[in-house]
């Protein structure tokens, strides 16, 4: 069964396949983000404790989820690459950190702007905030290691192993709020006893997150296509 | 068959790499446990033996009817409770908006063991994982 999928491992074919998918992602993402933002910022209710500041959540939480999801994707692609050795896997994985680091930055910045009015401080060194900052540095490390080895297979191996080492941070981020006492609140949506967030706030959050996820896919697909094109040019110019 | 074995080998190698890193991280975090917690509960604070005036954080709920402002309104005195032990807190400065009775707070400062007073230099508010519109909260309160 896996053999049937092999033909898609051809970068040229893959590049053509993702072309329409990419566009569908973009043209679904933009209206979803617009609707999510309009409902979130204007029509969703304020919170009983935080009041209007709660609206930062629609951006903060959705980009935080993408930052974590992106890492899981890098991790899986790296594992697949190291097992099956298809260069396409690592080529895709390498295009993710640059997009993901932007979502990580958005999360940290909106979080700190949210922290000031609710907690009374922009930043504290609690387990959740610190582990999320480490995620930012891991993404930076992945970007640098990719740049350092730009046209070398060794770079693929180093990148994959580094991403596997860094993956240990992901469960730490997720469960930091349960394992240690933190200033950051425990999970409101993805938790064992169901969401503890009112449905009127959950709906815009979900619309927004779906939109941001599709936008993320659009961005990495675009990057992957240009990376494939770049590889092709390099290969052709090395032939002369 | 040979191919399959190769992939299995690579997989087990990766698994070994990942598990050893996970184990190492686990021990590091376990060893640092005391340092990673952002604040101590009042019970933990009393357990601690050190009598040095260490800069630490205490967290818990603001006890009901324990908030007293000084006459000039600058100093405030309140109690933090974890429903087992309570600690008396003195603070001079600006309180966060979320500061109120039964609200989670974290106070940063030094604990005076003889006087049993926590001299806070900073007070942070904590909010929990519940999000709801004010009307629903009101309805829930009335039901009680």
Image (tube, rainbow, N blue to C red):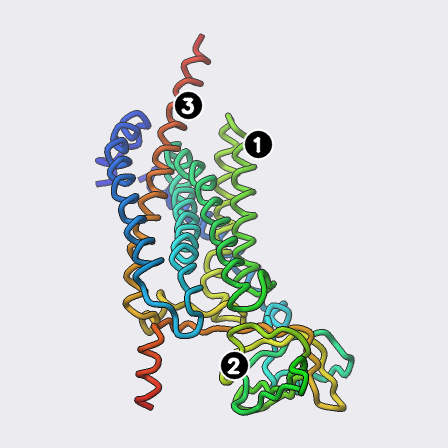
Q: Earlier in the sequence, mark 1 or mark 3?
A: 1
Across and down, in percent, residue B46 comes to 66, 87
Residues beneath discs 2 and 1 located on the same chain = no
Query: Dot 2: within a 10 Å radius of its alpha carbon, few (fewer than 14), some, or many (20 or more) residues?
Result: some
Which residue occupies the extreme top position in the image?
Answer: A240
Residue that badge 1 annotates: A148
Horizontal placement of A130 versus A69: left or right? right
Q: Secondary structure at mark 1?
A: helix
Chain bearing tag 2 is B
Quarter of the figure with the C terminus of chain A: top left
Query: Dot 1: within a 10 Å radius of its alpha carbon, few (fewer than 14), some, or many (20 or more) residues?
Result: few
Query: Dot 3: within a 10 Å radius of its alpha carbon, few (fewer than 14), some, or many (20 or more) residues?
Result: some
Front one among A226 and A202? A202
Residue A231, disc = 3
- Residue A182 lies in quadrant: bottom right
Question: Rounded to the nearest whole Å, what is the CA distance between mark 1 and mark 3?
Answer: 16 Å
Q: Secondary structure at mark 3?
A: helix
Residue that badge 2 annotates: B100
């Amino acid at each position: 069964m896996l053999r049937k999928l092999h033909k898609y491992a051809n970068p040229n074919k893959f590049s053509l396949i993702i072309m329409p998918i990419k566009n569908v992602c973009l043209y679904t993402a933009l209206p979803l983000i617009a609707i999510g933002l309009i409902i979130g910022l204007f029509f969703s209710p304020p919170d009983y404790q935080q009041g209007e500041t709660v609206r930062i959540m629609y951006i903060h939480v959705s980009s935080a989820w993408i930052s974590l999801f992106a890492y899981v994707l890098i991790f899986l692609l790296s594992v697949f690459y190291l097992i099956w050795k298809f260069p396409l896997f690592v080529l895709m994985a390498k295009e993710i950190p640059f997009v993901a680091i932007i979502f990580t930055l958005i999360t940290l910045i909106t979080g700190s702007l949210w922290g000031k009015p609710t907690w009374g401080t922009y930043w504290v060194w609690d387990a959740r905030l610190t582990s999320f900052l480490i995620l930012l540095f891991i993404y930076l490390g992945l970007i640098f290691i990719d740049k350092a080895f730009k046209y070398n297979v060794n770079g693929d191996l180093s990148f994959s192993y580094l991403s596997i080492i860094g993956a240990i941070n992901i469960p730490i981020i997720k469960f930091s709020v349960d394992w240690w006492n933190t200033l950051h609140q425990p999970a409101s949506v993805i938790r064992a006893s169901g969401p503890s967030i009112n449905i009127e706030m959950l709906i815009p959050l979900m619309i927004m997150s779906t939109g941001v996820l599709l936008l993320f896919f659009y961005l990495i697909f675009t990057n992957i296509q240009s990376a494939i094109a770049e590889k092709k040019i390099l290969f052709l110019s090395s032939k002369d | 068959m040979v191919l399959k074995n190769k992939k299995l080998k690579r997989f087990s190698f990766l698994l070994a790499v990942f598990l050893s890193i996970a184990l190492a991280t686990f021990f590091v975090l376990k060893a640092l446990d005391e340092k990673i917690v952002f604040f101590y509960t009042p019970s933990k604070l009393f357990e601690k033996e050190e009598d040095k005036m260490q800069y630490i954080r205490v967290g818990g709920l603001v006890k009901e009817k324990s908030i007293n402002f000084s006459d000039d309104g600058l100093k405030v005195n309140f109690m933090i409770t974890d429903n087992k032990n309570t600690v008396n807190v003195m603070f001079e400065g600006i309180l966060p908006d979320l500061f109120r009775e039964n609200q989670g707070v974290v106070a940063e400062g030094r604990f005076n063991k003889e006087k049993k007073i926590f001299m806070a230099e900073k007070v942070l508010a904590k909010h929990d994982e519940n999000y709801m519109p004010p009307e629903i909260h009101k309805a829930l309160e009335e039901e009680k």
